[in-house]
Image: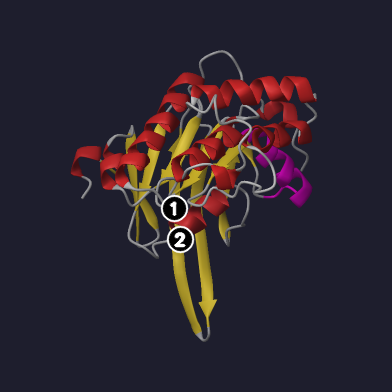
Amino acid sequence: MTVLIEEFKPVQEAAVSPVLTLDGLLRTYRQGTREIEVLAGASADIYPGEAVALVGPSGAGKSTLLHIAGLLETPDSGHVFVSGHDCSEISDIERTRVRRVAMGFVYQFHQLLPEFSALENVVMPQMIMGRGRRSAEDRAQDLLSSLGLAQRVHHRPAELSGGEQQRTAIARALANNPRLILADEPTGNLDPHTAAQVFDSLMSLIRGTGVAALIATHNLDLAQSMDRVLRLADGVLVEVQPSSVH
């Protein structure tokens, strides 16, 4: 199966179809002689412009679900659709291309390249996609400035605070105008005040760009601030009211 990368590029008109569809995902791990069922038919739709919280106890499989959604891992069965295209059977090369064009990733630990400045960390994924340096630098400058980092763009990660590092990671995730953001505990390594600031920055960009976001978090206050909440328990996803999360 061949996927045309152009089909994953952002569109200007309002879209009503899901950016991400998870359909009946099954995933079992073997631990010695035991089989541990992590996902047991997990299904969900994530739409443009919405932030969806993914909650559940430690060990429930939230990271596994995000890895499968991000085409970093394959399920034992089930399907992952990105912008309506079934990505379950495509080649590794095509999966990499879809990730680069359609997705942005934010992790608990920023994973910035330490030898490069904040600006360079946001420029590089754009140049990998073929954008010229000047255009990539302009885009990076705009993103970092919108996140309150205009005066910090030439600082390396070690010279930035934890919150500044994570905001740089958010800018990097959005650099190529993805349709989908996948975030795994993006504020989990920050103090409550800084976590709230980073979360507000992320939400502002989600609202401003119309990107869809699936955000795994243990911070129930942040989960309650999102549009929807999906709880992962016993291998399945159940939608719950944000106000009822506890």
Q: How is the image coloured?
A: secondary structure
Amino acid type shown at disc 2: Leu
Could you tell me which residue is drawn at 33 percent across and 60 percent down? Answer: 57
* Residue 210 appears in view: no
In this picture, which residue range is highlighted in magenta? Answer: 89-102
| Residue 225 rendering spot, x and y as whole percentages | 29, 34
Magenta highlight on residue 27: no
Could you tell me which residue is drawn at 51 percent across and 50 percent down? Answer: 66
Please, what is the dominant secondary structure of the magenta stretch? helix
| Residue 56 rendering spot, x and y as whole percentages | 33, 56
The answer to whether 61 is drawn above or below residue 33 in the figure is above
Say which residue label 1 marks: 42
195 vs 245, left or right, is right
* Residue 60 appears in view: yes
For residue 223, the mark is none
Q: In this orientation, which residue lies closer to the viewer: 185 or 58?
A: 185
Could you tell me which residue is drawn at 63 percent across and 30 percent down? Answer: 175
Q: In this orientation, which residue lies closer to the viewer: 116 or 2?
A: 116
Magenta highlight on residue 97: yes
Say which residue label 2 marks: 39
In this view, the residue farthest toward the top is: 13
